[in-house]
Image (cartoon, rainbow, N blue to C red):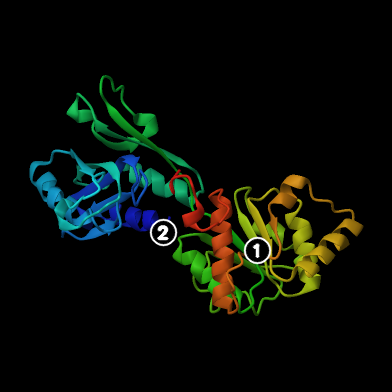
């Protein structure tokens, strides 16, 4: 999502143009990136984004020069299925066929403005890329709602773009700082909340999207995490963690994690049960305590990595096992 946000920023800057936008619209077999990856080549020839691991970008830039000169879009197909693939002298060996659609842009596209607004308001956006059509005028990227009637052998790539993950960090201690920093590097929206005003400050969390200070018993309500949000509780204070979790269990969230040993989590759940708080199975199934993957983490930075990795796996519907043990395609 960080890549998309950066791409949008450049697309909405008039100094970018004329430019060429390359979109990976079709993948058969294996590919480093999945369909929907984008590469922008601006007026100076600078590249932003990627459609591969770096092996196709330079060739795409060569085609982009032609697109700027003619103004005509085109599709470039890269076939790397050969065992002895030595295309462009790089030996890609990806064993896949990908189609890349290149379109000329002379000004900020209308869909980019709407996409930016939707992301800011945490709404999804449906895009459609017509990359093959009998009528050349139909080619290009647009909102799916504005997709023209395409017939015959048309090629249309549809994509739903979601807002970045929203991470609510309850606890503004020193170990929360690398967690916030890492989440922001990934382009996530991050809200930091703590009952202690001296901890939740802009100086300590300069990249946080929002800081919230309120008593622990009322800390979640002003944060108002949506149903698709993730939350990590890491105040290091039992008297704070219990009421915060009580409030979180009253909501249906994508992910709730609690820092600390398993015995501590068991005690908190028991205390909540004594208060009459019995989370439904669906919410308990999304409760991760201790939070994070078993990476052998020790330092705050390593712990932050284990937490972010577990959240990513949870959001992606994966079990976080090594890729070498995965029998299905990586992007399947």
196, 186: nearer the viewer: 186
Name the residue located 33 percent from the left edge and 55 percent from the top edge: 7
- Residue at the far top in the pictured view: 152
Q: CA distance from mark 2 to mark 1?
A: 21 Å
| Sequence-wise first label, 2 or 1 | 2
Secondary structure of the residue carrying tag 1 is strand
Q: Is residue 34 visible?
A: yes
Horizontal relation, residue 72 to residue 233: left or right: left
Secondary structure of the residue carrying numbered label 2: helix
- In this view of the protein, can residue 212 be seen by the observer? no
Residue 232's tag is: 1
Q: Residues within 10 Å of mark 2 (few under 14, many from 20)?
A: few
Location of residue 296 in the rendering, given as x and y in whole percent from the top left corner = 59, 73
For disc 2, the marked residue is: 2
Report the quarter where the C terminus lies. top left
Q: Which quadrant does the N terminus fall into?
A: bottom left
Considering depth in this image, is 160 or 263 the residue closer to the camera? Answer: 263
Res. 110 image quadrant: top left
Examine the rendered structure and indicate whether residue 105 appears above or below residue 181.
above
Pick the front one: 164 or 12: 164
Mark number displayed over residue 172? none
Q: Is 139 placed above or below 101 here?
A: above
x and y, in percent, of residue 277 in the image: 85, 53
Residue 258 or residue 135, whichever sits in front: 258
């Amino acid at each position: 999502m960080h890549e998309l946000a950066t791409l949008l920023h450049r697309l909405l800057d008039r100094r970018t143009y004329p430019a060429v936008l390359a979109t990976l619209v079709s993948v058969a077999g294996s590919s480093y990136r999945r369909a929907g990856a984008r590469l922008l080549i601006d007026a100076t020839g600078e590249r932003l984004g990627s459609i591969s691991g770096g092996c196709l970008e330079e060739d795409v830039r060569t085609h982009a020069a032609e697109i700027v000169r003619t103004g005509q879009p085109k599709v470039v197909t890269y076939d790397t299925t050969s065992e002895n693939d030595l295309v462009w002298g790089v030996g890609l060996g990806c064993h896949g066929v990908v189609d890349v659609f290149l379109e000329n842009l002379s000004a900020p596209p209308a869909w980019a403005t709407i996409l930016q607004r939707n992301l800011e308001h945490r709404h999804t956006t449906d895009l459609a890329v017509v990359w093959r059509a009998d009528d050349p005028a139909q080619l290009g990227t647009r909102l799916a709602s504005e997709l023209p009637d395409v017939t015959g052998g048309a090629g249309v790539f549809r994509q739903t773009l979601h807002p970045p993950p929203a991470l609510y960090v309850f606890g503004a201690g020193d170990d929360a700082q690398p967690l916030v920093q890492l989440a922001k590097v990934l382009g996530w929206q991050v809200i930091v909340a703590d009952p202690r005003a001296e901890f939740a400050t802009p100086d300590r969390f300069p990249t946080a999207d929002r800081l919230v200070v309120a008593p622990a018993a009322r800390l979640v309500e002003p944060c108002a995490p949506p149903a698709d949000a993730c939350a990590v509780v890491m105040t290091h204070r039992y008297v704070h963690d219990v009421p915060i979790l009580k409030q979180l269990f009253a909501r249906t969230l994508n992910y709730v994690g609690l820092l600390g040993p398993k015995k501590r989590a068991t005690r908190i759940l028991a205390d909540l049960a004594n208060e009459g708080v019995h989370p439904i199975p669906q919410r308990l199934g999304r409760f991760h305590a201790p939070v994070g993957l078993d990476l052998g983490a020790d330092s705050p930075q390593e712990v932050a990595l284990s937490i972010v990795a577990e959240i990513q796996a949870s959001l992606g519907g994966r079990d976080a096992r090594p890729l070498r043990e995965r029998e299905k395609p990586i992007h399947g």
